[in-house]
Amino acid sequence: MDLLQRLRIFVAVAERGSFASAAEALSLARPRVTNAIAALEGEMGVRLVHRTTRRTVLTGEGETLYDQALQLLSEAERTMNLFGGSAASPRGRLRVDVLVALARSVIVPKLAEFRSTYPDIELVLGVSDQPTDLIADGIDCVIRIGDLPVSSMVGRLIGRIELIVCGSPGYLEARGTPRAIADLPDHDAVVYFSGRGRRPVEWHLIEGGAERSVRMRPSLLVNDSEAFVACAVAGLGLIQVPRITVADHLAHGSLVELLGDLSTANRPVSVLYPSRQHLTSQVRAFIEWSASLIA
């Protein structure tokens, strides 16, 4: 095993905080990861990591080597790409996490295209609406909608997605149809939330050229995208939702778009990943591919 490969393994261990997680991400046997770190420590003459029962953390010398390793690997990648790209296509395991609505409506319908383009990538697709810890869970990147929280993760905007307000014909027959933002407080709303805090997601509407945040009074709080839409179809209240996730319901008439004379807001769609300085080729491939879908 050459030095660059040992450094790649070391960076994976440092960023994921676990020998086992690094081995899984790199599709390597765990003993090979252990041996690579031991070899590096022997060559450097210092201890690079401390291993506890729960986590692997870098020593001071390990932190210094981590910074240098990122630079060396980045330079090596640039050198490999001088003449039109790396010699081999992206390969290895790639773990991503995608919101339920985006997975069903955007990602999964095009996965055959991704697998055809990148046959050597072993994709592990997690589908969840809940916050994830990329490092602890060993996830390479996640796709999220909305403003990003302040964190140590790197966020890349890959597009914007249109939100609309809609309700079922049965609900509108019983409660009437809102014609303006001022009418919304008189209506029931199914409101989406995520995380342990159960904080309702505000609605975003544009009126008079300016975006307004509207905090609806929730008659029901839901933390799953599919259940969220199903509640609206069942007549339990109005929802604001990405248009693409309810396109079939709009076409079939089980949901009706509302406030059409108001321009609804667009929300950012972003990919988050742990480190800007060194991305594997499979993560770069997935980011570019998903960005093309959102665009």
Image (cartoon, rainbow, N blue to C red):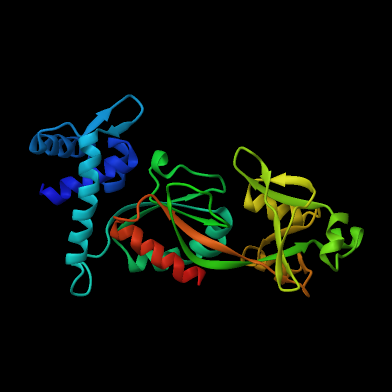
Residue 255 is at least partly visible in this image: yes
Closest to the observer: 59 or 166? 59
* Residue 4 located left or right of residue 91: left
Residue found 53% across the figure and 64% down from its top: 106
Q: Quadrant of residue 186?
A: bottom right
193 vs 176, nearest the viewer = 193
User: Vertically, is 9 above or below 145?
Assistant: above
x%, y% of residue 284?
A: 34, 62
Q: Is residue 29 above or below residue 120?
A: above
Compared to 197, does 216 lie above or below? below
Residue 26 higher or lower than 170, as above or below? above
Task: Specify whether 291 is left or right of 70.
Answer: right
Frontmost residue, 272 versus 107: 272
Residue under the image location 20 percent in, 49 percent down: 68
Q: Residue at x 77, y 67 (%)?
A: 256
Furthest residue in direction top, as rendered: 53
Q: Is 21 displayed left or right of 257 in the figure? A: left
Q: Residue at (80%, 61%) from the top-left corner?
A: 168
Q: Position of residue 194 (x, y in %)?
A: 61, 45
Q: Classify residue 179 as left or right of residue 11.
A: right
Residue 114: x %, y % from top left: 39, 65
Q: Position of residue 27 (x, y in %)?
A: 26, 47
Residue 23 seen in this snapshot: no
